[in-house]
Image: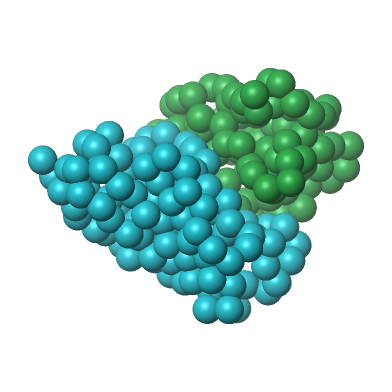
Chain colours: A green, B cyan
Amino acid sequence: GAVVSQHPSRVICKSGTSVKIECRSLDFQATTMFWYRQFPKKSLMLMATSNEGSKATYEQGVEKDKFLINHASLTLSTLTVTSAHPEDSSFYICSAGAGRENNEQFFGPGTRLTVL
Amino acid sequence: GQNIDQPTEMTATEGAIVQINCTYQTSGFNGLFWYQQHAGEAPTFLSYNVLDGLEEKGRFSSFLSRSKGYSYLLLKELQMKDSASYLCAAMDSNYQLIWGAGTKLIIKP
């Protein structure tokens, strides 16, 4: 149990376009989902915490208008990278907690975004 | 500030034992996690420690000392498939994970 899916797994887009990434908890309800970004050989960087039915909480330095997060239901959160630029190319990973006592977060498989 | 330190890279031999250390400083503490991450993939959960002591799970064990702000991940009977990055993460008082940069483990035959 506790499976998280992400779609798409890879996306290549032109500079200036917008890209939407979906994160779904398949067999549990997640009131909170997390969006991370990872640069090559670097640690995971938390971008924002997505709460169902309310606005996301963004980390310092993350542009809210550029990285739009919507948590429409207990099983779906979306991250939209607006007006993407080459520097937005990265590995984006979502995670969700299943409310277990060990506070474990379950990660999606990640989305590799390449902006040309 | 909040900080996680772990070695950047380690090399070990197939069949041997390796210990990956992690020290942490966080605002409050709600547990220490270890994740395994293969290149190009998302992290997968290995262990969670919130009390002092050793937690054993098959070939992998994890140790925590809260007073020292220290944890280690012990991998026994190393296999080539264990070549990966191992991420240490501490959960602070706001239940937010503070991540280390990861330790790249290279297994040699």
- Residue A40 in the image: state x and y as whole percent: 36, 48
Residue B18: quarter of image: bottom left
In the image, is residue A14 above or below residue B14? Answer: above
x, y (%) of residue B40?
A: 37, 35
- Whether residue A5 is visible, yes or no, is yes
Q: Position of residue A90 (x, y in %)?
A: 45, 42
Q: Nearer the viewer, residue A29 or B21?
A: B21
Residue name at image x 10 percent, y 40 percent: B109
> Total marks drawn?
0
Q: Position of residue B22 (x, y in %)?
A: 43, 66
Q: Is residue B83 visible?
A: no
Q: Quadrant of the N terminus of chain A?
A: top right
Using the image as rendered, state which of residue A2 and residue A93 is in the foreground.
A2
Q: Is residue A10 above or below residue B41?
A: above
Which of the 4 quarters of the picture holds residue B50? bottom right
- Which residue sits at x=52%, y=41%? B45
State left or right for residue B83 relative to residue B49.
Answer: left
Q: Is residue A10 above or below residue A15?
A: above
Residue visible at 77% across and 40% down in the picture: A99
Most extreme residue toward the right is A53
Residue A115 lies left or right of residue A3; in this view the side is left
> Which residue: 58% across, 26% down?
A6
Quadrant, the C terminus of chain A: top left
Q: In the image, B82: left or right of A67?
A: left
Q: Observer-nearest residue: A76 or A14?
A: A76
